[in-house]
Image (cartoon, rainbow, N blue to C red):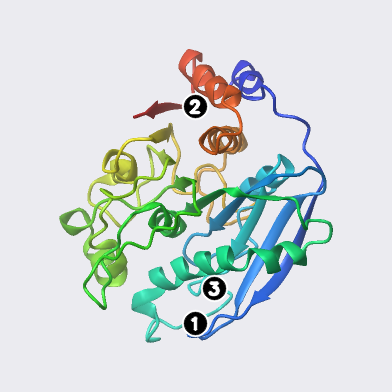
Amino acid sequence: MTASDAAATDVAVTAPAPIVSVKPVVLEAPGRGESLWVRISAPTTGSELPVIVFSHGFGSSLNGYGPLTDFWAAHGFVVIQPTHLDSRTVGVPQDDPRTPRLWRFRVQDMKRILDQLDLLEAAVPGLSGRLDRSRIAAAGHSFGGQTAGTLLGLRVLDPVSKSAEDLSDSRIKAGVLLATAGRGGADLTPFAAENLPWLKGPDFAHMTTPALVVAGDRDELPLSVRGPKWLADPYHLSPERKSLLTLFGAEHSLGGIAGYEVRETTDENPERVALIQRVTWAYLRHALGIEDTNWTAVQKALSESAAPMGRIESK
């Protein structure tokens, strides 16, 4: 992103507010086998704050994704991060009977957070009464993108029941899906088909909630035979009211969104991360009906740049 791009995307972005984070807030989760640990981050000032429930990638935890979650919180969102059962910090073994349904436990984690907003709000000093519960978004990276997408209407073919239920949630008004899996079937590698059965039969036709899909054009995951184009499927195969941010030169970590010091970041690029911060923030403010100025500005900056870091398209 050039200096002019940065200036354009900063229209109406105020200075970051101090934030407070509380972790872990422990929610009882009958039938899960483990309590649900949650982190809440919020600005210390402001009222009627919109909410983002963020789902981490496979193996991560509530401690990840600071480059995104800190930015969102410092610019007016309350960000809630669960630690899912597949986290390395939980240590569920591969032969655990819960493993085939890890995808579904993740969705249940997100719904449990929405059910327990009162408790979570009360756990953060000074936060009570400051949430805007009419403006809630779901976001996620990689496996977390599928989790968030399910709340938007994506249907996953359950490897146990062999059915694909509607697990969408009307409380979610918008989504951001980062580096998220595409079509199943013959598009999967043998490794993915054998080890990640929840990727076999996703159905995007019912994913009607507005969403921004973010994909890197060098994201060569060992999960699909189609290469980086696979990660754009959640945009192309879903109904309207979607946008796609394609990042030039980006791999699966999209420049380093998973953490400030994450070793698996192979394409570290602070400018790319800064672009994602501003585009996702602007999109969510647009999709949640807060304001449209910043979303218009980031689209204009990329389309007019002499050397853009990506492109945005919408339908």
* Residue 202 drawn above or below residue 243: below
Helix or strand or loop: what does disc 2 sit on?
Answer: loop
Residue sitting at x 37%, y 63%? 167
Please name the residue that numbered disc 1 is placed on: 32
Please name the residue that numbered disc 2 is placed on: 309
* Residue 126 drawn above or below residue 38: above
Quadrant of residue 277 within the rendered picture: top right
Helix or strand or loop: what does disc 1 sit on?
Answer: loop
Give the crowd class for mark 1: few <14, some 14-19, many >=20 residues within 10 Å.
Answer: few
User: Residue lying furthest left in this view?
Assistant: 186
Give the crowd class for mark 3: few <14, some 14-19, many >=20 residues within 10 Å.
Answer: some
Could you give the CA–CA distance between mark 3 and mark 2, rounded to whole angstroms?
33 Å
Could you give the CA–CA distance between mark 1 and mark 2, rounded to whole angstroms?
42 Å
The type of residue carrying mark 1 is Arg
Relative horizontal placement of residue 82, taking residue 240 as reference (left or right): right
Residue sitting at x 49%, y 52%? 172
The type of residue carrying mark 2 is Met
> On the rendered image, what quadrant is the C terminus found in?
top left
Q: Position of residue 16 (x, y in %)?
A: 77, 37
* Residue 28 drawn above or below residue 126: below
Count the marks.
Answer: 3
Could you give the CA–CA distance between mark 3 and mark 1, rounded to whole angstroms?
16 Å
> On the rendered image, what quadrant is the N terminus found in?
top right
Give the crowd class for mark 2: few <14, some 14-19, many >=20 residues within 10 Å.
Answer: some
- The reply to whether residue 1 is in sight is no
Relative horizontal placement of residue 2, taking residue 145 as reference (left or right): right
Please name the residue that numbered disc 3 is placed on: 88
